[in-house]
Amino acid sequence: MSSESSKKRKPKVIRSDGAPAEGKRNRSDTEQEGKYYSEEAEVDLRDPGRDYELYKYTCQELQRLMAEIQDLKSRGGKDVAVEIEDRRIQSCVHFMTLKKLNRLAHIRLKKGRDQTHEAKQKVDAYHLQLQNLLYEVMHLQKEITKCLEFNDSGVSFPNRLAEKYRECLSNKEKILKEIEVKKEYLSSLQPRLNSIMQASLPVQEYLFMPFDQAHKQYETARHLPPPLYVLFVQATAYGQACDKTLSVAIEGSVDEAKALFKPPEDSQDDESDSDAEEEQTTKRRRPTLGVQLDDKRKEMLKRHPLSVMLDLKCKDKVYYVERLNDSVLHLTFYYLMNLNIMTVKAKVTTATELITPISAGDLLSPDSVLSCLYPGDHGKKTPNPANQYQFDKVGILTLRDYVLDLGHPYLWVQKLGGLHFPKEQPQHTVIADHSLSASHMETTMKLLKTRVQSRLALHKQFASLEHGIVPVTSDCQYLFPAKVVSRLVKWVTIAHEDYLELHFTKDIVEAGLAEDTNLYYMALVERGTAKLQAAVVLNPGYSSIPPIFQLCLNWKGEKTNSNDDNIRAMESEVNVCYKELCGPRPSHQLLTNQLQRLCVLLDVYLETDSHDDSVEGPKEFPQEKMCLRLFRGPSRMKPFKYNHPQGFFSHR
Amino acid sequence: MERAVPHAVPLGQMEVFQALQRLHMTIFSQSVSPCGKFLAAGNNYGQIAIFSLSAALSSEAKEESKNPVVTFQAHDGPVYSMVSTDRHLLSAGDGEVKAWLWAEILKKGCKELWRRQPPYRTSLEVPEINALLLVPKENSLILAGGDCQLHTMDLETGAFTRALRGHTDYIHCLALRERSPEVLSGGEDGAVRLWDLRTAKEVQTIEVYKHEECSRPHNGRWIGCLATDSDWMVCGGGPALTLWHLRSSTPTTIFPMRAPQKHVTFYQDLILSAGQGRCVNQWQLSGELKAQVPGSSPGLLSLSLNQQPAAPECKVLTAAGNSCRVDVFTNLGYRAFSLSF
């Protein structure tokens, strides 16, 4: 069969479109002359069943040949090549057969499809005819019945209409009566509902579902200015959906809020009256320019009478006592009507009275606890650029002078109220946008909680540091050797200006890492006659932003990072390698671990001091730390890296 | 390494961390490309930065020209030493020496051509390699560092041919005496040792700290830097910077510098040295201080003179040390500008 096909194959194959007559003619030609060849014709002649058998046979043959070739190849040998070649040729021939069969199959499929299509078209045509005829029949029948009816009821036609009219009227009256009945029923319900609501109040309270209270709140909320309203709605929604520790309330006088919308004529009358009064009193006492300006300022900075209060509970684990204490962050949001900005006042209250260590004064103070919640957001300037022009008119230099009274206008506060002040294109009127508030709510609430918790942790740690104890938790003990001899003897807060004056902090200042929004401290670590000063920069974003240490050692002279490579290495161990010292999340142990590491580093530094041959007497600090080598590298670094659990020191 | 943001932008966690990394960076080694147009610098984080000297020195140079063309992580530990052959950059630090093709190095994702580790005796800690020295006549490389030995490696085959033992503490620096050929090594044990490469033996030892004129016990006895010029050798470190006559092993000139020096080199009729302190010091052979030119780093660890004949316009002295900056001196009198990681 396959050899037949290969004989019949000619270079030119004409594909005619399924015309059997032509095909038959071609076939006879092919057998004799072999000029034209049509596969379509051949398809009609061949039996699909037999083709299928041929296909299976060919596949089997191929498999057999492949297996034989495989065997021959694995056997190897010289004569094998000829045999393999032979089989290869046979396989090629089989492939040809398969290809032909494939083509035939495609042609058969195409034929079948064409036939089906033709038949379908015919059926569609008949169907259409049928529809047309049926429609005509129906139409004619209608006409007939109409005529018949008309013939029947030609005389009484107007009566029918009258009947219909009477029917409609009676329907209408029925419906009206039904409405009346229902109205009465509803109005009878109202007092019953009220009594049920009253009765359910104690149940609501018991089940913590204060619907009544919420209802009242929503009543009050209607009088909020738009940014506070946006904040109220978004915060309430967030609290209900994601965070049960958040509670939202509205404070202030609703009447005053309502009074803001007095009709203009009244106020004009008032003005003219007051003008008249003023004229009379000018002779007696003219208000000074200063007082006038003061009043104008007060007017400009006036707050809306209503404010929104958010209370955030921050779970705070006291690490040396196994109890959970809840501290609360109270946030009061105000809206400054003439400036179109929002401000916030913050207060942190704790379950038990906190005794504030001296150095911890600024940690939780209302003025600074929320400073730089987002980097750079110091809340000392108005975020609305249009306010500057208003300020110029009344002689206000900056909002900074008033923040203690008015609250801080942080950028995140504006966002929570849906207010956005784009710098590039200052808007004429900025309106409160719910989606802006919603997109910032979750992140901001989480940042607020983290902030309060880290500040509370620091608060406790400072109390311990002031007593010369570096509080290292048990899960961080592995970072340090068992014996640490250097001790923290002093922990105090220092002013920003004092930090700038220190001679060993110039690098940090030049790198722009010592802004006035940071908190600054000085620690003193001592051992024997050696005194190590550490100036600490605490970024408000602690603990995600690490504290930065700069060192000055007084022992056999003064050593800082500019004249001693090992002091520089010690700074690097706490500043750059801080991630090792973070401890378990949320990294509240970072600062204390850094201080403890500083004590360990001082121990290593002092004990590995190379003994000066010219000086008499023993070393002040005998080496107790286990080190593989004392110095390494061109800078002759000391082994500052502690290896746990083996307990020896090595180089990074 | 990313550029630091200017001060006006609020600093988030990433910016603060990068600023701290830059503040605590130390550049240990430098090497000029064979064409003379590029400078490689290696730092304590294991990174190598390639600077385009020709771009930074050209008249159209902008601020960006002072940044590296490419920076990549070369080693796990600090890159203490680098040298260049006529096609390769060789870098070493954390116990391994790696080779990079200068022709490929500017492309992103450049991989090392090969890496080799000398046969070390200790197994607890991998010793560092502090110094690399090319011996052109033998086509070999000498490595020395934490395991107190000098290893010679054939650059053709990569095989380690000799291990010269003698130092009792780790080795800081190497210098080559072309004529002989002999190698000088200076170490933490305070000795400068001469080795004959053909016999692989130590032929001379100078224990600098034992000479009263130059010893300074309060600094220690370590020899941090070495340079040699035919019969003369200059070395420094804990002891004072001293010029020695090699054949007679006598110190002929003591340079009055209190701060320990970490790098020294002969240049024309001068000796240049740098170490603790900001300045590059220029000395007359008589011992007089000709000039002291301050750089931008509080301490310097490496000096590099670009004397490649192919790029005379890039003939500069570059100095680097305890900062992320490489100072460029176009003439020895003043610092022209600084390149920065």
Image (cartoon, coloured by chain):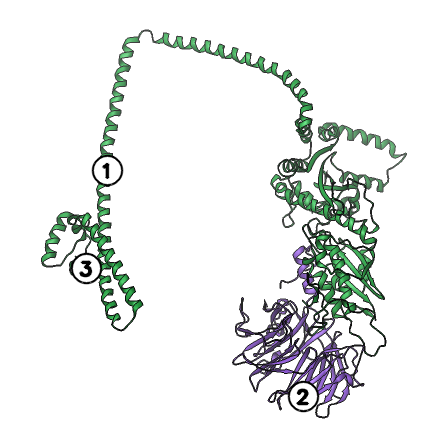
Amino acid residing under circle 1: Gln
Residue A25 visible within the image: yes
- In the rendered image, which residue does mark 3 sit on? A12
The first of marks 1 and 3 along the sequence is 3
Marks 3, 2: nearer the viewer: 2
- Depth check: A579 or B262 in front? A579
- In the rendered image, which residue does mark 2 sit on? B229
Where residue B199 sits, quadrant-wise, is bottom right
**Mark 1 and mark 3: Cα distance apart in space:** 35 Å
Residue B65 placement (x, y as % from top left): 61, 69
The answer to whether A71 appears left or right of B238 in the picture is left
Colour chain B is painted in: purple
Colour chain A is painted in: green
Q: Are marks 3 and 2 in contact (CB under 8 Å)?
A: no
Residue A579 placement (x, y as % from top left): 67, 57
Q: Chain of mark 2?
A: B
